[in-house]
Image: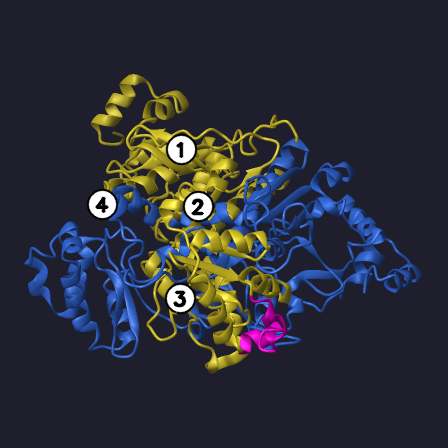
Chain colours: A yellow, B blue
Amino acid sequence: MTEPTKPLPLAGITVIDLSHIYNGPYATFLMAMAGAEVIKVEPLSGENLRSRGDLGGVALPFAMLNSNKQPVTLNLKSEEGCQLLREMVERADILVENFAPGVMDRLGLGAAALHEINPRLIYGSSSGYGKDGPYRDYPAMDLVMQAMCGVISSTGHPDQPGVKSGAALCDFMAGIHLYAAIMTALYEREKTGEGRVVEVSMQDATYASLASNLGMLHARGEQAPARTGNRHGGLGVSPYNVYATADGHVVLNAPGDHHFRAILDVMGRGELKDDPRFATRTARVQNVEAVDAVIEDWTRGHVRDDVARRMLAAKVPCAPVRELSEVMVDENMHARGQLQWVDHPDLGRVVLMHSPLVFEGTARRPITPSLPMGSCNEVVYGGWLGRSAEELVALRAAGVIS
Amino acid sequence: MTEPTKPLPLAGITVIDLSHIYNGPYATFLMAMAGAEVIKVEPLSGENLRSRGDLGGVALPFAMLNSNKQPVTLNLKSEEGCQLLREMVERADILVENFAPGVMDRLGLGAAALHEINPRLIYGSSSGYGKDGPYRDYPAMDLVMQAMCGVISSTGHPDQPGVKSGAALCDFMAGIHLYAAIMTALYEREKTGEGRVVEVSMQDATYASLASNLGMLHARGEQAPARTGNRHGGLGVSPYNVYATADGHVVLNAPGDHHFRAILDVMGRGELKDDPRFATRTARVQNVEAVDAVIEDWTRGHVRDDVARRMLAAKVPCAPVRELSEVMVDENMHARGQLQWVDHPDLGRVVLMHSPLVFEGTARRPITPSLPMGSCNEVVYGGWLGRSAEELVALRAAGVIS
């Protein structure tokens, strides 16, 4: 093992974060955990996720996404607010926003204006449909994008209407692509000395994840079922399903003939190894009902974790269908440091996430819990931009900061 | 508009791509579209996705993910094959692999060994559970990860068992996080001159996308439903659902009071604006069945696209629930260049994707369709590594390349 001695990769990078909810804040969360200083700029009412209070349980999501950021308040509808932002931009490396297209331009803070102040700035934005297509002005949120992108029609059982993915995948796919685009431009800036405008739409960012379903549509045309329940999206693998156990469910995803033989050994059904219905993947796909019946006959008589343990010991890709209460305390993610128990000043002892980006040779940045609105107004506007105590009082009185 | 004159951001970067299926290949696809030279190194039998032929409709997914790559074949189980790989590593910037943990070490090609050859190499790997936790040796595939990460238990209707997300989100979340980690390290290398080992697990990469559901679990504990059908993951927004129309379905996701009033206007139900059941978000959440009934009474009498058009015109976040056959020809993604009709030598005229990472000021790299296995053996082993025609013949005869 290398000793964890190298600095974090984004040490020295400063980010102005104007983003809200999940998309942009996930991108800037990853920057913070990779070592950047992230200044979270919120309107005086708080960013949308914070201002909801805990309606719908948003307190934990807010805490998950806003560790290690420095929150300031700023009224961008005042000229003095815009001036403070311009001064931050002068000193920053990256600006991130996920407003609807055109909002920053209307504030006089569009990418072209900010590049005049700082040509080295990386300006990263994300929206539902992007800046330049015919849908640019459609309002977009995760559920809307799941409908528009085909996620809903691809999810659920073939004899029922489609159902959304429980994961907010369009929001988070956009957020991580936005981080990725900005890092690419940051690399480029080291070579060229010039900043960039980069952009990601939620719609573009979701498309690739439906590759299996698009593949089946291409192969079968109108014969392709819109959705396959828990079976393979291309109906090309068996066993591949959710199976009931005595106390819950497991999944098996076992494409290889050796996998199927291993499953038969675990179940004590070695006599079926010579059954022509099960001998090859093609045969198993053709006899998928029989395959699933043989497996579920056995799994129903055993408890979930025992089935999973025995299948994994036989190197069969398998997992219990876990509830989120189990996922939150997952032994593996806690061992890796991706999940950590943190004493949060508002929420008490909670599980927060670190970044999925692991940089070997450097210890993980310790998690600093999310801070109340405007906590860093003094340090940012006073310490960094050089406003005096009297000036801060005047800015507060004028409703520019809080 | 800036004239599209800047080079692509990854121009001059060379990537050795040992990866397979979706996870790693998506990361290297994004590198290729951003301007890198990607050498796709496959075993003599072809990488797993290619070698399946079109079982389960994998031909299009393979084409989607392997545009603009240079495929070579290489037998890494031969010492001469390992030697050729080491020579490529000497000359490359990035190596990507998504083997199970330990495979590269057993081949003598682990990160430490390759960094001795080229200390500037960025070595990026991805696996299901990561290299250093207790689950590191569990086999993992997208369905298995969806079970393990709580995606299945969070998806579907509350009165039915969970169902998988139709999107392969664990695979693609890992792939884009892997790209992101590698770009972060590439930026860092410009500062420090040193390479890095970076790592992403599918499990870590999926967790954040369940933020809403984790938030409701935190807020309500055992009272939290495991899944909410098409309703909000935190049950904190209404209207938020899939609604039947005369010929299909639409979604509405309308958190604001002004959204609800706009919906009432579209439906000609202005008299309900004063109804206390609907006046605030809190009231609507408490009366969610009544809200959904009022809306669906109206939507059932209208056709899908007409409902969507009228709601969008009133600035209500809305979308038709589209089939993938509609998504593939989406007007907005085609206008942006994210989707393009391409004449593919094997597949004919198909829709392929570009990268969701938009770098303004540079034209998109033209899509070059995926190539047959080993197409670039001569140019890579001959032209780049300097093997003579006679040496190539000998390598083929020895089963090192094909």
Please indicate whether residue B13 sits to the left or right of residue B33 in the image. Answer: right
Q: Amino acid at mark 2?
A: Ala
Q: Choose mark 1 or mark 2, whichever is in front.
A: 1
- Magenta stretch, main secondary structure, is helix
Q: Residue at x 28, y 58 (%)?
A: B228
Residue at the spot 27% in from the left edge and 46% down from the top edge? B222
Residue B388, image x, y percentages: 91, 58
Q: Position of residue B224 (x, y in %)?
A: 26, 49
Badge 2 marks a residue whose secondary structure is: helix
**Where is B333 relative to B19, above or below?**
below
| Apparent side of residue A10 relative to residue A226 in the rendered image (left or right) | right
Q: Which residue is mark 2?
A: A111
Chain ID of residue with mark 1: A
Please state which of residues B299 and A244 is positioned toward the viewer in this rendering.
A244
Mark 1 → mark 3, Cα distance in angstroms: 33 Å
Q: Quadrant of residue A206?
A: bottom left
The amino acid type found where label 4 is placed reads Leu
Q: Residue at x 54, y 78 (%)?
A: A286
Alpha carbon separation for disc pair 4 and 2? 34 Å
Magenta span of residues: A269-286
Q: Residue B347: which quarter of the image?
A: bottom right
Query: Is residue B78 magenta-colored?
Result: no
- Mark 2 belongs to chain: A
Confirm whether circles 1 and 4 share one chain. yes
Under tag 1, what secondary structure? Answer: strand
Q: Give the class, few, some or many, for how many residues have Cα within 10 Å of label 3's Cα (few <14, many ≥20).
A: many
Tell me how far mark 3 sits from mark 4, CA to CA.
Answer: 27 Å
**CB contact under 8 Å: marks 4 and 2:** no
Q: Are marks 1 and 3 in contact (CB under 8 Å)?
A: no
